[in-house]
């Protein structure tokens, strides 16, 4: 089952109201959810590092929360709130870019994986942003 499948099952879409599912937005909903989990895991791993990783923990935690919220908004059929959705996508892009830049400063696997997930997430959010309204 994919995010696109569940969004396509929405009654408004079945009845032809609101047009077809937005594949780019559905993909953004999926990757922001994934990125949230990766950032949460990275923040937890940073807490176990012997060096001071406070800034990375904060940045990953902020990014995780922003990605999670963006995922939930992107999965809804809230066409009347396109401005909110655009704002969320832009905020998610910014949070992911900041988190990736922070994680890229550290030489460990969890930060490398997190930075990559954040870069991918920002790219998918940019694609979705082009398709909104």
Image (cartoon, helix red, strand yellow):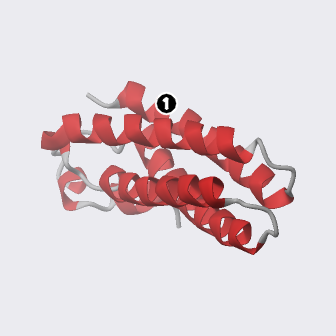
Is 24 or 45 nearer to us in this picture? Answer: 45
Q: In this image, 104 relative to 97: left or right?
A: right
**Depicted 25 relative to depicted 8: above or below:** above
**Residue 96 visible within the image:** yes
Number of marks in the rendered image: 1
* Residue 10 x, y percent position in the rendering: 26, 60
Residue, x 43% and y 34% (percent of image)? 128
* Residue 4 x, y percent position in the rendering: 45, 54
**Residue 30 visible within the image:** no
Is 6 or 127 nearer to us in this picture? Answer: 127
**Depicted 109 relative to depicted 84: above or below:** below
Is 19 or 88 nearer to us in this picture? Answer: 88
Q: Which residue is mark 1?
A: 127
* Residue 2 x, y percent position in the rendering: 52, 61
Residue, x 19% and y 49% (percent of image)? 78
Label 1 Cα crowd, 10 Å radius (few <14 / some 14-19 / many 20+)? some
Q: Quadrant of the C terminus?
A: top left
Residue at the top extreme?
130
Residue, x 40% and y 25% (percent of image)? 130
* Residue 25 x, y percent position in the rendering: 41, 42
Q: In this image, 114 relative to 10: left or right?
A: right
Residue, x 27% and y 55% (percent of image)? 76
Q: In this image, 68 relative to 72: left or right?
A: right
Residue at the front extreme?
52
Mark 1, secondary structure of its residue: helix
């Amino acid at each position: 089952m994919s995010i696109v499948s569940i969004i396509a099952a929405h009654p408004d879409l079945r009845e032809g109201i609101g047009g077809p599912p937005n594949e780019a937005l559905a993909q953004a909903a999926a990757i922001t959810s994934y990125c949230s989990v990766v950032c949460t895991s990275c923040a937890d791993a940073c807490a176990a590092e012997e060096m001071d990783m406070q800034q990375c923990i904060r940045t990953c935690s902020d990014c995780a929360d922003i990605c999670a919220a963006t995922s939930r908004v992107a999965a809804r059929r809230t066409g009347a709130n396109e401005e909110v959705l655009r704002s969320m996508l832009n905020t998610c892009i910014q949070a992911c870019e900041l988190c990736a830049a922070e994680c890229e400063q550290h030489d460990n696997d969890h930060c490398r994986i997190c930075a990559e997930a954040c870069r991918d997430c920002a790219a998918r959010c940019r694609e979705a942003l082009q398709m909104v309204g």
